[in-house]
Image (tube, rainbow, N blue to C red):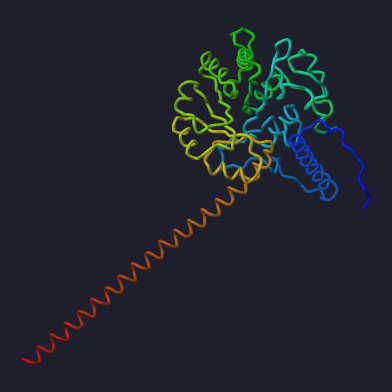
C-alpha cells in the first residue's frame, strides 16, 4: 500500500465536532451530485406529468400538522443561514425555516449563527466589529463547498420577503449576546418587530431565544406575536403552565436529550407546542414522533420527509392489519355465539326428546 502523505490544512483549526459536521455535509452533497449525474447519463427521457414536487417532499395525511423545521435552512446539504439553503428547504415543503440573527457594529440585523466569522465565512473577527455593509461583502458559501462561492450573509429583510412570497413560516432566533439591559429604540427585538410589521408577515413569524428576557419584552410589547422559549437543560424542573402565563409563548423548544413524554403532555395541556432541536438520526425521529412532539428542528429535512412517508405507510399497514384483525375477531366472536346457540339448541332438543320418551313410557305403563 502506498502511504498517504497528503495534508488537510482546512481542518487544522476545527474541532472534532466541526469536522464531523463538515464531512457529513459534504457526504450529503456528494450523494445528491452523484444521483443527479446518474439520472442525467443513465435514465432515458420520459414523458412527464405536470410537476408534483420532489420525492422527498413532505407527505400528506397522518402528519399534516407535524412541523418539519429546517435548522439554519437546509444546513445538512447547503451552507447554513444562506438564501440557497432556505430556498431549497422551501422547495421540498418544509413548514418552517429557522435562522439566527445578530447585530452588526452599526446595529443592524444580520443573519449568522456564530459570534465570530471564521467558521462560516472568509472573514475573521467578531461579528459586532464590522458594519452591515462590510459583512455583506463576505463569502458565506465557500467554506461549505466551492460550488457555493459568492453566497452572502442574508439580511432580515430578504428572508421576510421570501416568507411573504412563499408563505413559509420562519423562526427568528435572537442571539443572547445581542441583549441590551436598557430598552433602547434600536434594540434588536424592536427592529425585528418593526420589520415584521413592515412586511406584514406577523402570522408567519416565530421569535425565539435562549435569553428569555427578549421573549418577555416582545410579549409585553405585542402579545399577539408568536414567540418560543429555547432551553438546553433541566427541562424537568420547569412548569409549562408558568411558562405560558409569564411569556405567552407559542412553543417550547428544548434540546432533545432531556425531553420526556410526561413533559410533552403537560405542555399540550396549556396549549404550548413542543419543538425539540436538533433531530438528525432516524432513531431519534421515531423516538420524538412517538413521544407526541409537534415538530422537530433538523439539519436534514429530506430525511425527515422520507421518514414521515415510510413511518406513515408502516402505520397505515398496521392500521389496515388491525382493522382486518378486528373484523376477523368480530367474525370469530359471531361464530362462537352461533356455535353456542347451536349447542344450546341441541341440548334443548335432546332434553325435549328425553322428556317425550319418558312421557311415552309412562303412558304405556298405565
The structure residue drawn at horizontal position 69% and vertical position 33%, both measured from the top left corner, is 89
Q: List x then y, in percent, for residue 141.
A: 80, 28
User: Which is nearer the eye, 242 or 139?
Assistant: 242
Residue 132: quarter of image: top right
Relative placement, left or right, of 116 versus 332 is right
Relative placement, left or right, of 38 versus 297 is right
Q: Is residue 246 above or below residue 309?
A: above
Q: List x then y, in percent, for residue 347.
A: 25, 77
The structure residue drawn at horizontal position 52% and vertical position 42%, both measured from the top left corner, is 291
User: Which is nearer the eye, 75 or 364?
Assistant: 75
User: Which is nearer the eye, 189 or 231?
Assistant: 231
- Identify the image quadrant of the C terminus: bottom left
Residue 355: quarter of image: bottom left
The structure residue drawn at horizontal position 52% and vertical position 55%, both measured from the top left corner, is 320
Q: List x then y, in percent, for residue 66.
A: 57, 37
Residue reaching furthest to the left: 366
Q: List x then y, in percent, for residue 164.
A: 65, 23
Residue reaching furthest to the bottom: 365
Residue 25: quarter of image: top right
Count of numbered circles on the image: 0
Q: Is residue 69 above or below residue 36?
A: above
User: Which is nearer the eye, 259 or 348?
Assistant: 259
Q: Is residue 311 above or below residue 130?
A: below
Amino acid at each position: 500500500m502506498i502511504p498517504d502523505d497528503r495534508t488537510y490544512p482546512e481542518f487544522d483549526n476545527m474541532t472534532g465536532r466541526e469536522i464531523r459536521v463538515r464531512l457529513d455535509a459534504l457526504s450529503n452533497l456528494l450523494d445528491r451530485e452523484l444521483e443527479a449525474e446518474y439520472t442525467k447519463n443513465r435514465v432515458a427521457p420520459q414523458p412527464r406529468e405536470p410537476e408534483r414536487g420532489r420525492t422527498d417532499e413532505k407527505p400528506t395525511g397522518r402528519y399534516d400538522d407535524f412541523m418539519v423545521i429546517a435548522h439554519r435552512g437546509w444546513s445538512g446539504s447547503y451552507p447554513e443561514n444562506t438564501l440557497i439553503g432556505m430556498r431549497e428547504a422551501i422547495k421540498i415543503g418544509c413548514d418552517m425555516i429557522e435562522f439566527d440573527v445578530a447585530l452588526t457594529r452599526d446595529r443592524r440585523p444580520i443573519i449568522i449563527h456564530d459570534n465570530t466569522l471564521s467558521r462560516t465565512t472568509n472573514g475573521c473577527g467578531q461579528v459586532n466589529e464590522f458594519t452591515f455593509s462590510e459583512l455583506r461583502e463576505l463569502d458565506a458559501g465557500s467554506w461549505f463547498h466551492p460550488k457555493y462561492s459568492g453566497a452572502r450573509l442574508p439580511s432580515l429583510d430578504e428572508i421576510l420577503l421570501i416568507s411573504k412570497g412563499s408563505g413559509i413560516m420562519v423562526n427568528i432566533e435572537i442571539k443572547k449576546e445581542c441583549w441590551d439591559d436598557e430598552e433602547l429604540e434600536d434594540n434588536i427585538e424592536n427592529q425585528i418587530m418593526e420589520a415584521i410589521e413592515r412586511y406584514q408577515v406577523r402570522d408567519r413569524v416565530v421569535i425565539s431565544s435562549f435569553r428569555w428576557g427578549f421573549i418577555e419584552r416582545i410579549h409585553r410589547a405585542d402579545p399577539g406575536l408568536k414567540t418560543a422559549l429555547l432551553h438546553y437543560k433541566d427541562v424537568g424542573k420547569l412548569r409549562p403552565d408558568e411558562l405560558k402565563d409569564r411569556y405567552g409563548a407559542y412553543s417550547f423548544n428544548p434540546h432533545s436529550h432531556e425531553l420526556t413524554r410526561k413533559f410533552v403532555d403537560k405542555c399540550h395541556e396549556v396549549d404550548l407546542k413542543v419543538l425539540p432541536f436538533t433531530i438528525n438520526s432516524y432513531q431519534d425521529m421515531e423516538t420524538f414522533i412517538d413521544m407526541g412532539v409537534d415538530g422537530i428542528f433538523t439539519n436534514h429535512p429530506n430525511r425527515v420527509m422520507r421518514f414521515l412517508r415510510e413511518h406513515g405507510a408502516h402505520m397505515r399497514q398496521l392500521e389496515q392489519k388491525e382493522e382486518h384483525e378486528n373484523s376477523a375477531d368480530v367474525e370469530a366472536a359471531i361464530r362462537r355465539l352461533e356455535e353456542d346457540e347451536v349447542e344450546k339448541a341441541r341440548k334443548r332438543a335432546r332434553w325435549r326428546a328425553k322428556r317425550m320418551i319418558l312421557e311415552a313410557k309412562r303412558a304405556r305403563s298405565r
